[in-house]
Amino acid sequence: MHGFYLASEAAQLDCGRTLAERLRGQSGLVFLRGDLGVGKTTLVRGLLRGLGYPGAVRSPSYTLIEPYEIGGQQIYHLDLYRLGDAEELEYLGLRDLLDGEALLLVEWPERGAGVLPCPDLIIDLEHAPPGRQLRWLAQGDWASLLRNPPLWSGKFATSIG
Ligand SMILES: Nc1ncnc2c1ncn2[C@@H]1O[C@H](COP(=O)(O)OP(=O)(O)O)[C@@H](O)[C@H]1O
Ligand SMILES: [Mg+2]
């Protein structure tokens, strides 16, 4: 995994915006892992801003899923924290979303274990006061998508390798 330190909410948003440059027009599955309050939704907010979404980005903690359409790109932001069991994902129409051309951003993907397939990108966040430590791993086609040219290197402090 690669990683770096995000010292503030502003850095967290900036990191999401940077990711947007590479994910515009992409479909795929992103896991956002880490404790409550670690900045998962903030990262998504930065990403959606980067894609050009002007409106409010609310946490889908209660709705579980929040759809966006930005410049023709379908994006779904999911927060599975309150998911009863993984079977409920069927009712959310997950199958269709996965079969389609959408970009799925999933907080608490652990709750969907057994139903969610292998992600294209895993982002792990940890509290590291005053900021957050981010680690990421891109798989399959996304490994080169995010590495060539390197996406985040030099932009944020202290690579942890
Ligand atoms: N890198 C960071 N450094 C300091 N505070 C942050 C950082 N990223 C996010 N925050 C703050 O953490 C709080 C929780 O963020 P949120 O994105 O809602 O977390 P989560 O979705 O993981 O529960 C917010 O007040 C946000 O401003
Ligand atoms: Mg959240």
Image (cartoon, grey):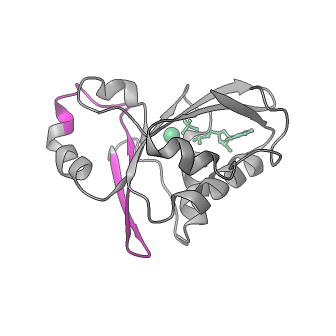
Magenta-colored stretch includes residue 84: yes
Residue 12 in view, yes or no: yes
Q: How far across and how far down the image is residue 18, in percent?
A: 67, 56
Q: Position of residue 40 (x, y in %)?
A: 56, 40
The C terminus lies in which quarter of the figure?
top right
Q: Is residue 64 left or right of residue 92?
A: right
For the point 76% across and 51% down, the residue is: 10
Pick the front one: 144 or 33: 144
Where residue 147 sits, quadrant-wise, is: top right
State the residue in front, 4 or 107: 4
Q: Kindly identify the residue that appears in the image at 81 percent across and 43 percent down.
A: 156
**Numbered disc total:** 0
Q: In the rendered view of the protein, which quadrant contains the N terminus?
A: top right
Which residue sits furthest bottom? 71
Question: Residue at position x 61%, y 64% from top?
Answer: 50
Please identify the quarter of the rendering in which residue 52 is found. Answer: bottom right
- In the figure, is residue 112 to the left or right of 81? left
Q: Quadrant of residue 35?
A: top right
Q: Is residue 86 left or right of residue 63?
A: left
Q: Is residue 66 above or below residue 128?
A: below
**Residue 133 appears in the picture as rendered:** no
Give the x, y percent position of residue 2.
Answer: 67, 31
Q: Nearer the viewer, residue 116 or 13?
A: 116
**Magenta-highlighted residues:** 65-89
Q: Give the residue at x 23% y 27%.
A: 86
- Magenta stretch: includes residue 151: no
In the image, residue 38 lies at what x, y percent? 62, 32
